[in-house]
Image (spheres, rainbow, N blue to C red):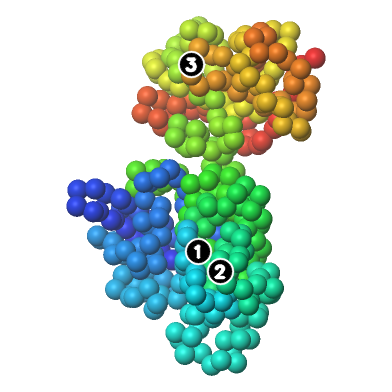
Amino acid sequence: MARIELRNLHKAYGSVVAVRDLSITIEDGEFIVFVGPSGCGKTTTLRMIAGFEDPTRGEIRIDGRVVNDLEPRDRGLGMVFQSHALFPHKTVAQNIEFGLRMKKVSADERARRVREVAEMVKVTHLLAKMPAQCSGGESQRVALARTLVTNPSTFLLDEPLSSLDAKLRRELRAECDRLHEVLKRTFIFVTHDQEEAMTLADRIVVMRGGEIEQLGSPMQIYSDPVSHFVADFFGSPSMNLVAGEVFHEGGAPRFRTELFSIRLPASCNAVPAGPATLGIRPENVGVDPQGHGDVVLPVRLVEPLGKDTLLYFDDGTERAFVAVVAGLAAATLEPGAKVGLTLPAEHLFLFGPDGRRLARGTAEPERVRARMSV
């Protein structure tokens, strides 16, 4: 296993800064996921760890040793790329053993290790095939096996599932999780998919503009976002965010828009009056078809999903206000129906004009589906 430290890691391409003074310690055996939109610096960070990019300044340490000047092959790391990058003229077995052949491992040892990793990732039946005869999911398993066979201390995975369909992504995501449990090695995974980050990571590094926006466990990131950006990026559907203003009435804080005015939790007492954005997760919105609540909005769209129903409401903006209702009771609502919505104070978030969180409600971090009043 390996402990990796990034100290003030910085990468610039001329006047363009890709990664800005990034510092983080990745512990032995940890599964850490770098997530963020395109251009945020997550892949550049991974490539600097791997040795494919030289940092402009800063240090990369592996088990306390500075490796900035080491070649990729000397760092003891294994890389799985977004493209499978398999040799088309070699069989699956020959692709898997390629790294061992370059290290001049004996033929018997190569064959033994290829068999072992092929069984581990369930590609034994493919060993005699050519890459062109493999499906996308099979090719990705082969790419994983090719990295596994070299026995690296750390696995670096650069959006390895992005080219697969949804079902295969779920299967390979579970496979990555299983391999981490079996191998007990350090995994550094890069993705733009917040669902992959939430389901795989011990810790998530949310990146934006080359910097760390937030670092924490999946539930910390989801339940306690530090900024408008993180709140909007995580969740499917993402957090409802409504622009308005804070004001104080009778010494108590309140929030208002053109459509409604609601009380804010006591945690917002110190928030000054002025522009702000109110946030609440869709599963925490109360729904009453009889029209009772903090605000009454017309239904724009109903999406029955089986165990849940998504209700989209017209709040006067292009971005609809969303509620997640348990079960199918809400599926009978028609577009245009006026529905009452309750916004519990303990589940509210308040973000300032700069996007940073000003305050949050008092509820413990949790995920609950809203229940519709009948």
Which residue is denoted by mark 2 in the rendering?
131
Give coordinates of residue 290: x percent, y percent: 73, 8
Marked residue nearer the N-terminal end (2 or 3): 2
Element type at mark 1: loop
Checking the image for residue 84, the label placed there is 1
Amino acid under label 3? Thr
Residue at mark 1 to residue at mark 3: CA–CA distance: 42 Å
Question: From the viewer's perspective, is 327 left or right of 133?
Answer: right
Crowding at mark 1 (Cα within 10 Å: few <14, some 14-19, many 20+): some
Q: Considering depth in this image, is 280 or 16 the residue closer to the camera?
A: 16
Q: Are marks 1 and 2 in contact (CB under 8 Å)?
A: yes
Give coordinates of residue 95: x percent, y percent: 53, 76
Decide: is 226 above or below 2.
Answer: above
Q: Considering depth in this image, is 287 or 166 the residue closer to the camera?
A: 166
Give coordinates of residue 101: x percent, y percent: 48, 86
Element type at mark 2: helix
* Quadrant hosting residue 264: top right
Checking the image for residue 317, the label placed there is 3
Q: Nearer the viewer, mark 1 or mark 3?
A: 1
